[in-house]
Amino acid sequence: MTDDGAAVVAAVEAVAERIEDERSYLTELDSAIGDADHGGNMARGWAAAADAARDLDEPDAQTVCKTVGKTLMAEVGGASGPLFGGSLVFASAELDGGVTPESAVAFAETYLEKVEDRGDARVGDQTVVDALTPAVHTFKKSIETDDRPPLEALAKAVDAAERGVAFTVPIRAKKGRASYLGWRSVGHQDPGATSVLYILEELLAVAADR
Ligand code: ADP
Ligand code: MG
Ligand code: MG
């Protein structure tokens, strides 16, 4: 197994564990503005993804990401399956030559583009995009413009995602189930954006450990 591949498998396992820990909280958030299944959807998907990642024989980073994406698409269902999983399958191609600061930026940007394509949501629509966009832009700027080390860039991205999650609270949902509520979605934290934050926090923890 390449080092990158092993790191990605470890990250997927960490995410699966974290999402399982946060499962009831994520469901609680989704019960306020959705159909109370986000925690279950994500926990089921990431548990299956961790199993699939562990079963791979000596995988590289791209293979792990693609497998995880496919598994999420198959297991998660709802809005989040194609958003989290399909985008990951697509973005995994950027890791063709392994994980470098440059390929990580390309991966992050492609992932965000795909999420936007698939869901047609933009910043301010109270979705995953509100956490992903500031995270991806901050990551890219830290690496490309400020020339920061990848770990520091990732830490800044996590902070940006955290602010993005907070930003979902006072705004109105314009995409997904929560949009059916109209103004009644105001005052609620978006479950999908919250999941994005947890995933990024775990990527950071695993990266910091290596
Ligand atoms: P469902 O809404 O089908 O039950 P989930 O509960 O698993 O699916 O996921 C809900 C989350 O999906 C929302 O909190 C939001 O972040 C995200 N979401 C829903 N629709 C969109 C969209 N069109 N674009 C981006 N994210 C979306
Ligand atoms: Mg739901
Ligand atoms: Mg649902």
Image: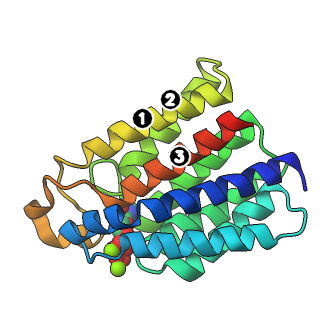
C-alpha separation, residue under disc 2 versus residue under disc 3:
11 Å
| Mark 3 residue crowding within 10 angstroms, few (<14) / some (14–19) / many (20+) | many
The image quadrant of residue 128 is bottom left
Asked if one can make out residue 187 in the rendered structure from this viewpoint, the answer is: yes
Is the CB atom of the residue marked by disc 3 within 8 angstroms of ligand 1's nearest atom?
no
Query: Image height check: is 71 above or below 148?
Result: below
Asked if the residue at tag 1 contacts the one at tag 2, i.e. Cβ–Cβ closer than 8 Å, the answer is: yes
User: Along the line of sight, which residue is nearer the eye, 53 or 104?
Assistant: 53
User: Is 10 positioned to the left or the right of 186 in the image?
Assistant: right
Q: Which residue is mark 2?
A: 156
C-alpha separation, residue under disc 2 versus residue under disc 1:
6 Å
User: Is 210 positioned to the left or the right of 144 in the image?
Assistant: right
C-alpha separation, residue under disc 3 versus residue under disc 1:
10 Å
Disc 1, SS? helix
Nearest to N terminus: mark 2 or mark 3: 2
- For discs 3 and 1, the disc positioned in front in the rendered view: 3
